[in-house]
């Protein structure tokens, strides 16, 4: 028991030294940039730099919430590939129980995708475009 505690303490010592080195290097870089950085405040220093082009108009543009939803959906469904890759690497070790768990995981994600599709979260058309499209379909059906 004493030998296991010694090994654990030695492993923790390496981790503590590594953490200390990371904190020290981060502090040196932040402190160095503060001490060596420019101290003057010019009017142009507070303006956004647009690759040498003078900015025109308001920089605060309102984006549709669809952009943010798409980004969130991408992150969620992209994580699926990470988990499935890890599962595929350990396929032989996990056996049939792991295969069944992966099928349940994929099933939940497919159900989420079907739900998002059914509520229109993946539809980027505006309300006016959806109404016009449905009227156009009605006109096509009547011909």
Image: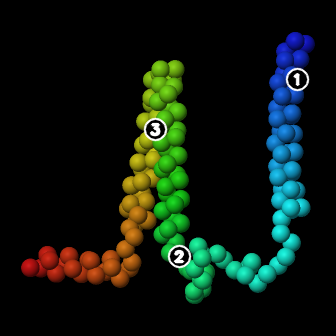
Residue in the image at 39% along x and 78% along y: 126
Give whichever of discs 1 and 3 has the lower sequence position.
1
Specify whether residue 114 is in view: yes
Image coords of residue 108 (percent x, y) = 46, 45
Give the secondary structure at mark 2.
loop
Q: Report the side of 28 relative to 57 (left or right).
A: right
Image coords of residue 77 (percent x, y) = 48, 50
Mark 2 Cα within 10 Å, few/some/many (few <14, many 20+)?
A: few
Residue in the image at 20% along x and 76% along y: 137
When the figure is inspected, residue 129 is found, relative to residue 16, above or below; the finding is: below
Q: Report the side of 114 relative to 28 (left or right).
A: left
Q: Which residue is mark 1?
A: 9
Q: Nearer the viewer, mark 3 or mark 2?
A: 2
Choose top left, top right, bottom left or bottom right for residue 49. bottom right
How far apart are the two marked residues, 1 and 3, measured between alpha carbons? 41 Å
Residue contact between numbered discs 2 and 1, judged by CB atoms under 8 Å = no
Residue contact between numbered discs 3 and 2, judged by CB atoms under 8 Å = no
When the figure is inspected, residue 72 is found, relative to residue 142, above or below; the finding is: above
44 or 19, which is in the foreground? Answer: 44
Mark 1 Cα within 10 Å, few/some/many (few <14, many 20+)?
A: few
Residue in the image at 86% along x and 72% along y: 39
Choose top left, top right, bottom left or bottom right for residue 16. top right
Residue contact between numbered discs 1 and 3, judged by CB atoms under 8 Å = no
Q: Quadrant of the C terminus?
A: bottom left
* Label annotation for residue 63: 2
Image coords of residue 67 (percent x, y) = 50, 68
Image coords of residue 38 (percent x, y) = 83, 69
Residue in the image at 51% along x and 64% along y: 69
When the figure is inspected, residue 9 is found, relative to residue 25, above or below; the finding is: above
Give the secondary structure at mark 3.
helix
* Label annotation for residue 104: 3
């Amino acid at each position: 028991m004493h030998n296991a505690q010694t090994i654990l303490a030695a492993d923790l010592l390496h981790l503590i030294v590594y953490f200390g080195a990371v904190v020290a290097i981060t502090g040196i870089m932040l402190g160095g940039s503060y001490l060596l950085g420019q101290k003057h405040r010019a009017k142009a220093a507070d303006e956004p730099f647009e690759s040498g082009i003078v900015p025109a108009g308001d920089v605060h543009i309102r984006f549709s919430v669809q952009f943010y939803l798409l980004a969130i959906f991408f992150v969620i469904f992209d994580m699926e590939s990470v988990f499935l890759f890890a599962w595929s690497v350990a396929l032989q070790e996990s056996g049939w129980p792991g295969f069944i768990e992966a099928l349940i995981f994929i099933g939940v994600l497919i159900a989420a995708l079907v739900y998002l599709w059914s509520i229109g979260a993946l539809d980027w058309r505006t309300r006016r475009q959806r109404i016009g499209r449905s009227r156009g379909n009605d006109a096509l059906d009547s011909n």
